Image (cartoon, rainbow, N blue to C red):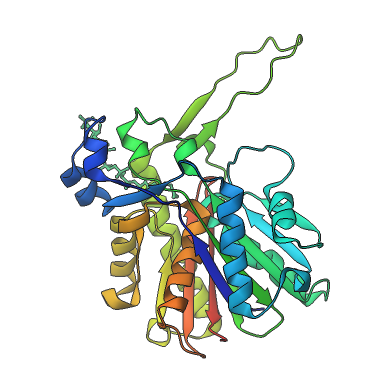
């Protein structure tokens, strides 16, 4: 597999920490110190599928392809207005593509899970060009009365076009069932036969546990992949980590012992946009001219489940 195009899209409504101070018992100082986040982009008039389509179109253009060239669409998404049809079906129609599509939910690790699936499809010659779109609106899962969660998230979309190649050097996925640490339960329709107690809650997060799991698992994944490929941290141009929280990013960087410049971040501008964070940051690096053919990149993400995904790729463009 190799990545041949990237794209991203963010909502226009920028919500600063100062704006949150107006209706939450919080401060810019607390949020900045604990998370590094200064601002997040939150959906207002936009629809998630339109943002996803915009990111996908940009990735196609960057790849020099059109929707007709795509053989498969994988969409990573945790929540959106539709339970059915899949968000990938809606995106397919808006793009004017004709290929099969599928949604996956591996929470914030979704981009890596999607790349793993794409690699398998390419290896089996079941597709030539695959579009991965990660589109997320976590702002609709949190209670905006809960200062512990709503300050952390933003909405957005990131996309990548992948095709056959030898640039995916190693990939690792893990899942550990720990549903009580991070979850969102929504209301289903009542039926005449439901007589069990049901729980519906906006996003619940045991922040300190998430923090510890994120740091230790991400480090473990990266070390395993470096060992597997015989590479060292010095061989890696950038460590592209899930953008959940600046302190998590810094803790992972300290464990790895690498300089700040090699661990890019944009969480301060966008908040945590779940699985869209990695492809959106990759797109920023790509469009900012920061990547050169042959650069080795580490991706690492972690999310509810608990899921983790990491990989090493060589930049092919
Ligand atoms: N403003 C002011 N005070 C706050 C806020 C806020 N926005 N949020 C929580 N507090 C208060 C709490 O109520 C608590 O007050 P108390 O001591 O009177 O009870 C105090 O701050 C400390 O709360 P903790 O939750 O213990 O604070 P902590 O230092 O652990 O920081 C945080 C919380 C930032 C969530 C941290 O645990 C963290 O970074 N966890 C990682 C979670 C994460 O990044 N999740 C992202 C989503 S998951 C994913 O992407 C994988």
Q: Residue 245 versus residue 25: which sits nearer the camera?
A: 25
Q: Is 172 located above or below residue 295 in the figure?
A: above
Q: Is 186 located above or below residue 192 in the figure?
A: below
In the image, farthest residue toward the front = 45
Q: Residue at x 42, y 75 (%)?
A: 285
Residue 246: where, in percent of width, then height?
30, 58
Residue 117 appearing in the image: yes
Q: Residue at x 76, y 10 (%)?
A: 193
Q: In which quarter of the image is residue 281?
A: bottom left
Q: Residue 69 versus residue 220: which sits nearer the camera?
A: 69
Q: Quadrant of residue 24?
A: top left
Q: Residue at x 45, y 77 (%)?
A: 287
Q: Residue 134 versus residue 249: which sits nearer the camera?
A: 134
Q: Which image quadrant shows ligand 1?
A: top left
Q: Which residue is drawn at 71% across and 69% down?
A: 130
Q: Quadrant of the N terminus?
A: bottom right
Residue 116: where, in percent of width, then height?
66, 66
Number of disc labels: 0
Q: Is 267 located above or below residue 18 in the figure?
A: below
Residue 3 appearing in the image: no
Left/right of residue 316 with respect to residue 232 in the rendered view = right
Q: Quadrant of the C terminus?
A: bottom right
Left/right of residue 99 with respect to residue 289 in the rendered view = right
Left/right of residue 198 with respect to residue 271 in the rendered view = right
């Amino acid at each position: 597999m190799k990545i041949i195009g990237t794209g991203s899209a963010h909502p226009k409504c920028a919500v600063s920490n100062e704006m949150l101070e107006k209706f939450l018992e919080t401060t810019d100082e607390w949020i900045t110190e604990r998370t590094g986040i200064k601002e997040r982009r939150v959906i207002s008039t936009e629809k998630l599928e339109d943002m996803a389509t915009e990111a996908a179109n940009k990735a196609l253009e960057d790849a020099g392809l059109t929707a007709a060239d795509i053989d498969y669409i994988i969409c990573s998404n945790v929540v959106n207005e539709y339970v059915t049809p899949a968000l990938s079906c809606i995106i397919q129609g808006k793009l004017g593509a004709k290929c099969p599509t599928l949604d996956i939910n591996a929470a914030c690790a979704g981009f890596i899970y999607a790349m793993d699936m794409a690699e398998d499809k390419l290896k089996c010659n079941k597709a030539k060009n695959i579009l991965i779109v990660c589109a997320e609106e976590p702002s609709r899962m949190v209670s905006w009365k809960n200062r512990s969660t709503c300050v952390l998230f933003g909405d957005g979309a990131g996309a990548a076009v992948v095709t056959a190649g030898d640039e995916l050097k190693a990939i690792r996925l893990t899942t550990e069932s720990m549903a009580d640490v991070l979850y969102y339960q929504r209301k289903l329709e009542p039926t005449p036969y439901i007589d069990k107690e049901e729980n519906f809650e906006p996003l619940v997060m045991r922040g300190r546990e998430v923090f510890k799991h994120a740091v230790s698992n991400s480090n473990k994944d990266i070390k395993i992949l470096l060992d597997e490929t015989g590479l060292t941290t010095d061989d890696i141009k950038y460590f592209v980590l899930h953008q959940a929280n600046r302190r998590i990013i810094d803790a992972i960087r300290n464990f790895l012992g690498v300089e700040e410049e090699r661990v890019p971040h944009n969480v301060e501008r966008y908040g945590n946009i779940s699985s869209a964070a990695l492809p959106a940051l990759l797109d920023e690096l790509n469009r900012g001219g920061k990547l050169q053919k042959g650069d080795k990149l580490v991706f690492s993400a972690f999310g509810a489940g608990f899921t983790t995904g990491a990989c090493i790729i060589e930049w092919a463009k």
